[in-house]
Image (cartoon, grey):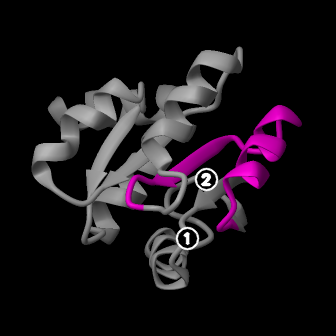
């Protein structure tokens, strides 16, 4: 069972994220969620090693998920994988600046988000599935 931390200040965004992914987005990937609207809670959970994956909303306010991601990536070793959500296509570069492992766009594409979660949580299985598709 993997733990996914979801950070967004808007309740509708937090709900969209968890509902889009579900409890079992792929074979062998079962999830539990920690959901918060407070950046200090994200840091606290991350410091304790709670999440296996974090999804941070770049549009969160007053502490944006992109700055929070960069802080965590620079302060935690190892830092769990992070998916950053951005509001505009032109903001994808900020996701790269934040050192996010994946950058996705609002509005949330449920299929893309679920696939990204599975890939980041289970890279060897995802790579094997991709190899199998190619043959």
User: Splitting the image into 4 quarters, where does residue 8 fall?
Assistant: bottom right
Which-is-in-front pick, marks 2 and 1?
A: 1
Point 59% across, 17% down: residue: 74
Residue 1 shows up from this direction: no
Residue 2 spot, x, y in % from top left: 72, 49
Residue 7 spot, x, y in % from top left: 59, 60
- The disc at residue 115 is none
Q: Which residue is mark 2?
A: 29
Badge 1, how many Cα within 10 Å: few under 14, some, many 20+? many
Residue 107 spot, x, y in % from top left: 25, 71
111 relative position to 16: left or right: left
Cα distance between the residues tagged 2 and 1 = 26 Å
Find numbered disc 1 in the image and state the secondary structure of the residue it sits on. loop
Q: Which residue is mark 1?
A: 9
Q: How many marks?
A: 2
Point 55% across, 82% down: residue: 11
User: Splitting the image into 4 quarters, where does residue 71 fall?
Assistant: top right
Mark 2 vs 1, N-terminal side: 1
């Amino acid at each position: 069972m993997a733990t996914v931390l979801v950070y967004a200040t808007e309740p509708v965004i937090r709900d969209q994220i968890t509902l889009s992914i579900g409890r079992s987005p792929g074979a062998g990937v079962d999830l539990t969620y920690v959901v918060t609207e407070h950046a200090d809670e994200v840091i606290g959970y991350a410091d304790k090693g709670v999440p296996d994956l974090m999804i941070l909303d770049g549009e969160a306010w007053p502490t944006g998920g992109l700055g929070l991601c960069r802080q965590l990536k620079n302060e935690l070793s190892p830092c769990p994988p992070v998916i950053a959500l951005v509001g505009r296509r032109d903001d994808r570069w900020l996701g790269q600046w934040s050192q996010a492992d994946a950058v996705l766009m609002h509005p949330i594409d449920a299929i893309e988000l679920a696939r990204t979660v599975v890939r980041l949580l289970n890279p060897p299985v995802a790579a094997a599935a991709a190899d199998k598709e190619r043959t």
